[in-house]
Image: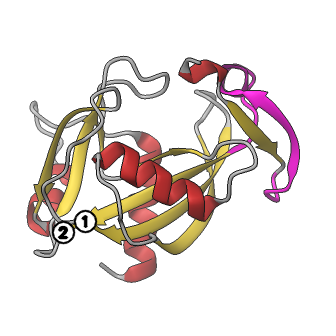
Amino acid sequence: MNASEEMHDVVDERDRVVGRAPRGEVYARGLVHRCVFVRVRDAEGRFFVHRRTAGKLLFPSMYDPFVGGVVAAGESYDDAALREAEEELGVSGLPRPEFVLKFLYDSGGVAGKWWSAVYEVRCDPPVRPQAEEVAWHAFLTPDELRERLSDDGPEAWEWVPDGLAAHDRLVAHLGR
């Protein structure tokens, strides 16, 4: 099954399940669905950052300060956060990510809206990121991440907009 055929819960503006549809249809029709964002830090306090592969359905080849993805039909946010983190990092046995906050993200017509549950987890290198998901990765210090996020020069990284929204809300919520 390819990514556009994966089944996802369709939810309303209050995050109540109202149906199911394949990912491709969810994106094409702009249906409200669920996603998880997991901020990963290592023992030194560095953040895992990656560039998405060119084959991604949404935001291909863009940089992301989170691992995560769409919550599968019938799956809980908590289970999706752990599954997505382990898959994208290429590790097993992670501690369960800690839930921090949830918000409704509006993609401005790109692919609808999605409830975004934001988590944190610690994962120490080495990681073996999933080649289908991650084209490049690194652990950046807080200062390096701040610099990359605020850089608007000619070599600025293009960040996924939902990841930036999650990052801004997480920083405002935690004060860091």
Residue sitting at x 25%, y 35%: 51
Nearer-the-camera pick, 33 or 88: 88
Q: CA distance from mark 1 to mark 2?
A: 5 Å
Q: Position of residue 86 (x, y in %)?
A: 38, 52
Q: Position of residue 134 (x, y in %)?
A: 27, 34
**Label ID, residue 123:** 1
Q: Position of residue 83 (x, y in %)?
A: 48, 52
Q: Against 7, is 13 above or below?
A: below
**Label ID, residue 42:** 2
Q: Colour scheme of this structure image?
A: secondary structure
**Magenta-span inclusion, residue 97:** no
Q: Is residue 176 left or right of residue 137?
A: right
Q: Earlier in the sequence, mark 1 or mark 2?
A: 2
Give the residue furthest to the bottom: 175
Residue sitting at x 58%, y 37%: 107
Q: Against 81, is 156 above or below?
A: above
Q: Against 169, is 84 above or below?
A: above
Q: Residues within 10 Å of mark 1 (few under 14, many from 20)?
A: many
Magenta stretch, residue numbers = 13-33
Q: Is residue 6 left or right of residue 42?
A: right
Give the residue furthest to the right: 18
